[in-house]
Amino acid sequence: MMLDFPDLAFGTNYLYVTCNAFDAAGGWTNTVLFRIPLKSLESGAPSAEVWSTNQTFALRCAQHCSRTAYFAAHQNTSTLRVFSWGDADVAPSITDVTVPTWNQDMPFVSMTPDNFNWLGRADGRVLGATAFGSQLWFAWGANAGGANQRPNPYVQIAYLDTANGNITLKDSINLWDPDVAIQYPAIDSTIDGDIGVSYFFGGKNAYPSHAVSFLLDVSDHVVTASGAFGPKEQIWGDYLTVRRSPDGRRLAATGYTQKTGSAEENVAPRYVLFSR
């Protein structure tokens, strides 16, 4: 068995680890979540509860999920399946939330000025997730089209409310542009409740580049690094993250660009602290 695409999230009492499991032939078998008590890590004798599903691919757990972990994946292109796992619960419960229909047809295509499709490996997995109070946020990449007929691949974000024990859609946010594709979102929240996002954009007259922004109220989208080449391998993504800084009021984002050429060795990593 091979475990792939891992992610970590903290709650009040647990560390949550999600990953996808594949057999020796490379076929997906199930998605796994490990719930590790923080006290067991502190004691030096870690233990874990293991929960898995063979019905839902590529779960993503929300950061800062307090005493109930929320994690989600797509049931289909109009249904987000949200799992809730309270600290005292033996197993998660499921809520299906209807979201505006999006397009997951592959391949995603966005050609760079040097004629590389930088979205050759893009898909619709949930990549960003965070919680703040009763707010839940899940973000993923979508292909062109969807309910709003976006002209290029874009990012769709579900803003959910968990008040009164129910999980409902409060808003659906699109990050999109008429000329370039936007993909590979990562999100997190500050201790003040600001929701920050990090993403890549590129295509047409723009090489793949990195930007950050905030999702609530008015905010400028700031380009942190502009690319100078497309990727020769025609793949991108995966290694984009946003996490709270130690003071909780700033967010730390990671990204990269192709600065001096199109090969893998020409990748220039980027670390960004941002706030407002």
Image (cartoon, rainbow, N blue to C red):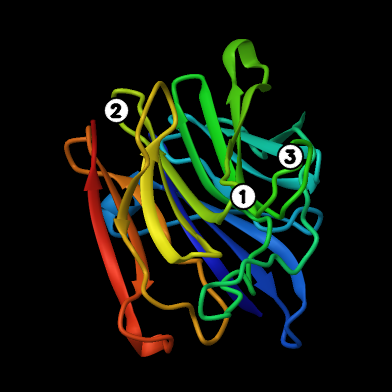
| Amino acid beneath label 1 | Tyr
Q: Nearer the viewer, mark 3 or mark 1?
A: 1
Q: How far across and how far down the image is residue 58, in percent?
A: 66, 58
Closer to the camera, 120 or 252? 120
Q: Which mark is residue 154?
A: 1
Q: How far across and how far down the image is residue 270, in percent?
A: 27, 64
| Amino acid beneath label 2 | Ile
Q: Is residue 120 above or below residue 225?
A: below
Q: Which mark is residue 75?
A: none
Q: What distance separates the C-alpha of mark 2 from that of mark 1?
A: 28 Å
Q: Which mark is residue 81?
A: 3
Q: What distance separates the C-alpha of mark 3 from that of mark 1?
A: 21 Å
Q: Which residue is mark 2?
A: 191
**Earlier sequence position, callout 2 versus callout 3:** 3
Q: Nearer the viewer, mark 2 or mark 1?
A: 1
Looking at the image, which residue is at 67% across and 17% down? 166
Left or right of 78, for residue 5:
left
Left or right of 228, for residue 118:
right
Q: Residues within 10 Å of mark 1 (few under 14, many from 20)?
A: many
